[in-house]
Image (cartoon, helix red, strand yellow):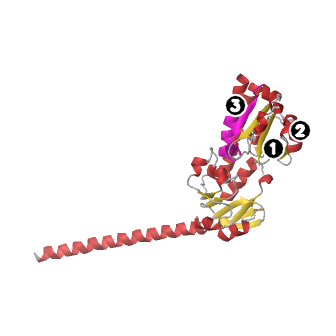
């Protein structure tokens, strides 16, 4: 009996020792893993910003995009912003994918601090930039400096995802080339198009790189702009005109922006508008300004689909 009892005690001690060693090993592994994660999170790299070199997280994960134009670029590259402006939230192309992002007013620094971004993106010259820099490393991008392709590649650099960004560009170029052939077969190669939108008290025509589908129409599909639009709007990006002057800028097809951000399209009720050849021929295409405002990869692909369908359908009528 004594031997059996002694054997049982020794067996129990062996089991307890094994369990203790296993727990210690697991704890050490977890501690090493946590240290590795903390180390990765604290790693930085140098990004050559427009203001000069800046230290940013090596792999930004909590990005606050306070420039309305860029959230879709981050989404395409696998990073959902933790904070955005209300403009981005209104887009039908981006809205569902941005539901997890906090909608923050540009000067709501307290809420921005609460979401704890590890990187903030805004426009160059943003009056809030100094405050942003107190919260997290902040990069300003000049909208006019980049076309929509360069814009995506630059954001790829910021995220350390240059290959992924270039991959989208390559796929897009192939897709756009196919779409261009389809449109040219439907409407020809000599037609012109104009993009018109009323914002505030003014009516605008837009150049080739200012959202509203212009990148798709003029660049991807290669549709020409009327000479007056090209001469006056392509350089600055847009041109404010009077409603009475619209016929001077009207192309064979007219794209008209409508939506919450558009103040009025009453010019479409005038006889002057109704007498424009494109209007009389039914070549007016209305688009959702809240969504077409953007020229990120996600938005631009949706715009391409919409515009190709609209043009080919009208050509078939």
* Residue 121 shown in magenta: no
- Label 3 near label 1: C-beta < 8 Å? no
Viewer-proximal residue among 28 and 54:
54
What is the span of residues highlighted in magenta in the rendered image? 281-308
Viewer-proximal residue among 275 and 5:
275
**Furthest residue in direction left, as rendered:** 1
**Which residue is under mark 3?**
310
**Is the residue 205 above or below the residue 109 in the image?**
above
Q: Secondary structure at mark 2?
A: helix
Viewer-proximal residue among 202 and 130:
202
For the C terminus, give its image quadrant. top right
Lower sequence index among marks 3 and 2: 2
Front position among marks 2 and 1: 1
Front position among marks 1 and 3: 1
Q: Residues within 10 Å of mark 1 (few under 14, many from 20)?
A: some
Residue 306 percent across, percent down from the top left = 67, 35
Lower sequence index among marks 1 and 3: 1
Lower sequence index among marks 2 and 1: 1
Would residue 147 be seen by someone viewing this image from the given angle? yes
Q: Secondary structure at mark 3?
A: helix
For the N terminus, give its image quadrant. bottom left
In the visual, does 190 lie left or right of 58?
A: right
Where on the picture, by quarter, is residue 245? top right
Residue 294 percent across, percent down from the top left = 70, 47
Q: Which mark is residue 204?
A: 1
**Which residue is under mark 2?**
228
Q: Which mark is residue 243?
A: none
């Amino acid at each position: 009996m004594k031997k059996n009892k002694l054997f049982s005690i020794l067996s129990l001690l062996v089991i307890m020792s094994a369990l203790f060693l296993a727990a210690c090993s697991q704890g050490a592994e977890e501690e090493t893993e946590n240290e590795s994660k903390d180390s990765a999170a604290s790693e930085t790299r140098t990004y050559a910003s427009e203001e000069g070199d800046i230290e940013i997280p090596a792999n930004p994960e909590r990005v606050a995009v306070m420039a309305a134009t860029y959230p879709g670029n981050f989404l395409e590259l696998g990073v959902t912003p933790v904070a955005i402006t209300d403009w981005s939230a209104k887009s039908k192309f981006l809205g569902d994918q941005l539901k997890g992002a906090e909608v923050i007013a540009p000067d709501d620094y307290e809420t921005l601090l609460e979401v704890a971004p590890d990187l903030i993106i805004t426009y160059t010259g943003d009056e809030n930039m100094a405050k942003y820099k107190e919260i997290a490393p902040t990069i300003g991008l000049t909208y006019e400096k980049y076309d929509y392709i360069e814009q995506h590649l630059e954001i790829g650099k910021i995220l350390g995802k240059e290959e992924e960004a270039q991959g989208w560009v390559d796929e897009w170029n192939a897709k756009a080339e196919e779409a261009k052939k389809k449109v040219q077969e439907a409407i020809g190669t000599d037609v012109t198009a104009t993009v018109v939108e009323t914002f505030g008290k003014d009516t605008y025509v837009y150049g080739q790189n200012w959202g509203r589908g212009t990148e798709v129409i003029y660049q991807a599909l290669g549709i020409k702009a009327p000479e007056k639009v090209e001469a006056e709007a392509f350089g600055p990006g847009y041109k404010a005109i009077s409603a009475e002057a619209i016929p001077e800028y009207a192309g064979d097809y007219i794209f008209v922006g409508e939506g919450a951000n558009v103040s009025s399209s009453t010019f479409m009720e005038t006889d002057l508008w109704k007498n424009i050849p494109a209007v009389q021929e039914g070549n007016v295409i209305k688009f959702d300004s809240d969504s077409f405002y953007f020229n990120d990869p996600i938005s631009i692909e949706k715009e391409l689909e919409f515009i190709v369908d609209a043009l080919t359908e009208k050509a078939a009528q």
